[in-house]
Image (tube, rainbow, N blue to C red):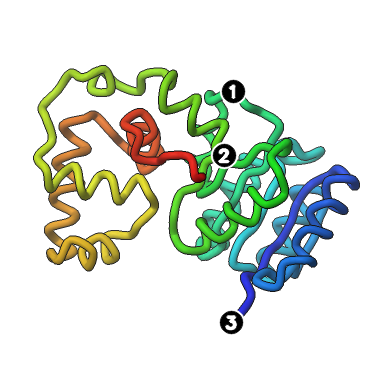
Amino acid sequence: MTPIRIALVDDHPVVLAGIRALLQGAPEVELVAEANTGTTGLKAICECSPDIAVIDLSLPDISGLELARRLSRRCPAVKIIALTVHEDRAYIHPALEAGARGYLLKRSAGDELLRAIRAVNDGAIYLDPAIAEKASTNAPELTSADSGDGDELSRREEDVLKLVAQGFSNKQIAGELEVSVKSVETYKARASEKKGLHSRADIVRYGIRRGWLAAPN
């Protein structure tokens, strides 16, 4: 099996050493690049094109959010996992908007990072279990629709929106539901309009509130 290629950007030597040791002990992953600043991280990631970039949100030069934005523009095939000490759910939305597909707390156990890597590599959105649990019960409202206002979704619209929130592409959703890609786009557009959702990050946050992105066991 081809290993999942990982790049790591973090300015704390202890964190870098710990994650390096974790990844080197996991045969399904391969650490192909390390950096301790956003600038050097951007250069290294664009040069080696890993499958996943694990980036600290607090870096000494450009922020992790800005690094994620630049990676999303310059290296869109690279999937991003945000690594952070911030447990406040207010940080999740900007990270997702910047292009992150995973959000993981540094205090989480090492195995949690491996679970996040596997999930994101498979196309899912991954939230740290502690964050997902808090967000699903206490997340602030995005729009009036989040509090129950607005038109109700049809069963098919809800199915599509749920799969979008979980990270599936339109093509994957079409295959899962046995409909055309055009139909998926139509259902997603209708559902988003009904609920006032304007981006994938909005859809993910709506999914969190609905309990569609349950924390893994």
- Contact? badges 3 and 2 (CB < 8 Å): no
Q: Which amino acid does label 2 sit on?
A: Asp
- At x 41%, y 39%, the residue is 201
- State which quadrant residue 25 falls in: bottom right
Circle 1 sits in a helix, a strand or a loop, which is it? loop
Label 3: which residue?
A: 1
Residue at image location 46% in from the left, 26% down from the top: 135
Of all residues, the one furthest to the bottom in this rendering is 1
Asked whether disc 2 touches disc 1, contact meaning CB atoms under 8 Å apart, the reply is no
Would residue 206 be found to the left or right of residue 14 on screen?
left
Horizontal side of 90 relative to 211 (left or right) equals: right
Residue 5 picture quarter: bottom right
Mark 1, other Cα within 10 Å: few <14 / some 14–19 / many ≥20: few
Contact between labelled residues 1 and 3, with CB atoms less than 8 Å apart: no
Q: Earlier in the sequence, mark 3 or mark 2?
A: 3
Q: How far apart are marks 3 and 1 (CA)?
A: 37 Å
Label 3: state its secondary structure: loop
Closer to viewer: mark 3 or mark 1:
3
Q: Mark 2 points at which residue?
A: 128
